[in-house]
Image (tube, helix red, strand yellow):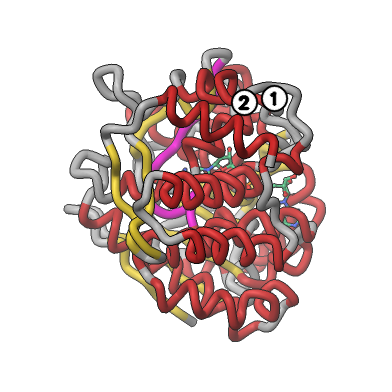
Amino acid sequence: MAVITVDVAGRPYEVRVAAGLLAELVQHCRGRLRKRSVPIVTDRNVHSAWGDVVEAALRDSGHEPHWRILPPGEATKSWDELSATVNWLLAQEVERGDHILALGGGVIGDLTGFAAAIVKRGCHFIQLPTTLLAQVDSSVGGKTAINTPAGKNLVGAFHQPSLVLADLAVLDTLPERELLAGYAEVVKYGLIGDADFFSWCDTNGPAMLAGDPALREYAVAHSVAHKARIVAEDERETSGTRALLNLGHTFGHALEAETGFSDRLLHGEAVALGMVLAARFSARVGLLSRSSANHVADHFASVGLPSQLSGLGLACDGQALAAHMLHDKKMDAGQLPFVLMKGIGEAFIARDVELSEVAKFLDEELEA
Ligand code: NAD
Ligand code: GLY
């Protein structure tokens, strides 16, 4: 088992990574499940696949699980589901010292974490991430949020979990498309600050995706360790370090917005293409070599992730995509910071990018 500590000031917590952690849930949560009754929020798909394992683990140790099973999908990160979940937690008589379990992907983790942040002004929660994306990114670092009609993740809180148990066994039931989407966030750590890890992905990515257990543990633990270092340095995204994790996200969010935040383009797929666009834009303005930008695109293409904007078949122009970026929550005094690349493993924040230049670049990419 790999154990990574996220050293946030005053509230350090562990991320444990191994196969079989859900079956040993109570042992890992020792001391945290104070009452017989344990509230668990999940979605229907995850409950079908892993509900029995968690139910048995809790009941075998004398606990009584209380499930809140939500519809799967991004639409669940809504005011309505938040409000109903908060009311449900209050009906469960959850106290500040109790721990709520969040069993699912980023949707369940973000919603449950936000509910935990506001119920009784903050109670504890434990992340049990069941997608690769949630294991390497969303379950770690304490960003919680819901979506509103004005945009994605616009209402939320920083609220760190008390523990994260990343059970690698859950990846066996994850649809392949979701696994690939999570892989984009794994590669991101290589691209932002770890060229050796990007090389590791080149060599081992396909076998890891195919299910090699040792490679999976390495990929998840290495990604989590990278994120943990960033979060410990810049928990609230104020110094610029944590903002590096947004590589590919500004372009990606525009693509998600244009495709209606739908199954047409999953978040991780948008981030993969967004990272290709960030690399190509960096090359266009002379920061990155063309061969490095092509290397990034070729890597994503080789595993089956989107790597060509023209391949999406969008019926819009570059200006329309750039317009979506204006609603980005990273806008700062009218300027949108972009994460660009000087090399593989050398991402940085650029604060002088003109959106009109981005729109022109996107027009070229839409026609390429
Ligand atoms: P998701 O939670 O929607 O899960 C994807 C799909 O896989 C769902 O249909 C789900 O039911 C299913 N699923 C999950 N685990 C499964 C399993 N083990 N077996 C079978 N099916 C399973 O999507 P996601 O990609 O995990 O998360 C995306 C969300 O995460 C977005 O809302 C995004 O904004 C958010 N996010 C948050 C952060 C953060 O720092 N908080 C970071 C990145 C992304
Ligand atoms: N996923 C970006 C962050 O946690 O900051």
Quarter of the image holding residue 31? bottom left
Above or below for 210 versus 235: below
- Regarding residue 139, the answer to whether it shows in the image is yes
Q: Residue at x 24, y 57 (%)?
A: 232
In the picture of the structure, the residue carrying the numbered disc 2 is 257
Task: Name the kind of residue labelled 1 in the image.
Answer: Gly
Q: Are marks 1 and 2 in contact (CB under 8 Å)?
A: yes
Front position in the image: 131 or 119:
131
In the picture of the structure, the residue carrying the numbered disc 1 is 260
- Residue 147 on the magenta segment: yes
* Left or right of residue 29, residue 215 in this image: right
* Left or right of residue 306, residue 361 in this image: left
- Residue 177 on the magenta segment: no
Q: Which residues are magenta?
A: 137-148
Above or below for 91 versus 312: above
Instruction: Give the image location of residue 96, x and y in percent.
Output: 35, 38
* Left or right of residue 159, residue 105 in this image: right
